[in-house]
Amino acid sequence: MAKKGNRIQVIMECTEHKNSGMSGTSRYITTKNKKNTPDRVELKKYNPILKKVTVHKEIK
């Protein structure tokens, strides 16, 4: 039986791509512990459209 914990799925979206006005989006799905990190998460991830590593912020 699965454990019920504090881990939730979050969607990460690229901030640079959003501001550039180009079509498409760069999004990743990851998990976080909402008890340890109640704030929104920022991670550096690869954006395949811009072909470089950019900052991705949590949405939702």
Image (cartoon, rainbow, N blue to C red):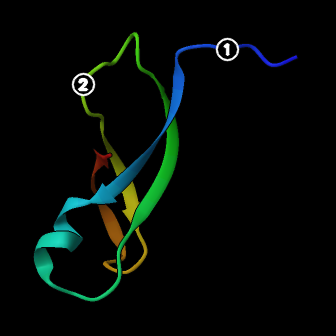
Identity of the residue drawn at 37% across and 51% down = 12
Crowding near pointer 1: few (<14 within 10 Å), some, many (20+)?
Answer: few
Q: Report crowding for label 2: few under 14, some 14 to 19, many 20 or more residues within 10 A (C-alpha).
A: few
Of residues 26 and 51, the one drawn nearer to the viewer in this rendering: 26
Q: Is residue 22 left or right of residue 47?
A: left
The x, y position of residue 7, in whole percent, is 54, 22
Q: Earlier in the sequence, mark 2 or mark 1?
A: 1
Give the residue type at disc 2.
Answer: Asp
In this picture, is 6 found above or below 15? above
Instruction: Determine which residue is flagged by label 2.
Output: 39
Q: Residue at x 32, y 46 (%)?
A: 60
Q: Is residue 23 placed above or below 39 in the rendered structure?
A: below
Q: How many marks?
A: 2
Question: Which residue is located at x 31 percent, y 78 percent?
Answer: 50
Nearest to the eye among marks 2 and 1: give it.
1
Asked which secondary structure carries label 2, the reply is: loop
For this view, does 48 lie left or right of residue 52?
A: right
Q: Residue 20, relative to residue 3: is it above or below?
A: below
Residue that protrudes farthest toward the right in the picture: 1
Label 1's element?
loop
Q: Position of residue 56 (x, y in %)?
A: 29, 52
- Label 1: which residue? 4
**Residue shown at the point (40%, 10%) measured from the top left:** 35
Distance CA(mark 2)–CA(mark 1): 21 Å
Residue 37: x and y in percent read 34, 18
Please state which amino acid type lies under the numbered disc 1: Lys
